[in-house]
Amino acid sequence: MPHADPLVITIYICNCQVQRVMVDGGSSADILFLDAYRRMGLEVEEIKRSNPPLVGFDGKWVSPVSVVTLPVTAADRTLNVEFIVSDSPSAYNAIMGHEWIHWMEGVPSTLH
């Protein structure tokens, strides 16, 4: 019986362990939610402003707070990732999109 559970992982962003990170091969952006950004001890002033809106999961437009480039470590590989910082509610701390999956040379898979 097939299932549709999301692929959720733990990674390191800026040397901070970040849990509840969704891997979404359908996302064209890497998103870091503002609550998680602040819990990492980073200042909002360190990020550059961004204006283009995003389409959220519910189909509504979401205005990003800003864009920031941070080091992301998963397994033994570290990449600098440009995140869109979003101040919207989410069950996740971050969403890693298809470009990150490609550069990590990852193949998202669940048990089958």
Image: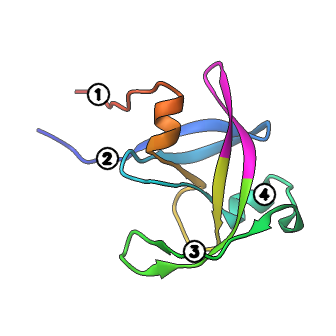
The residue labelled by disc 2 is 5
Q: Nearer the viewer, mark 2 or mark 3?
A: 3
Looking at the rendered structure, the kind of residue marked 3 is: Pro
Which image quarter: residue 72? top right
Label disc, if present, on residue 111 of the rendered structure: 1
The segment highlighted magenta reads 69-81
Against 65, is 16 above or below?
above
Q: Secondary structure at mark 2?
A: loop
The residue labelled by disc 3 is 52
Counting every numbered tag in the picture gives 4
Marks 1 and 2 sit apart, C-alpha to C-alpha, by: 10 Å
39 with respect to 86 (left or right): right
Looking at the rendered structure, the kind of residue marked 2 is: Asp
Residue at (51, 61) in percent of width and height: 91
Of 100 and 18, the residue lying toward us: 100
The residue labelled by disc 4 is 39
Q: Secondary structure at mark 1?
A: loop
Query: Where's residue 10, x and y in %?
Result: 59, 37
Which numbered disc, 1 or 3, marks the residue that appears first in the sequence? 3
Which numbered disc, 4 or 2, marks the residue that appears first in the sequence? 2
Which image quarter: residue 74? top right
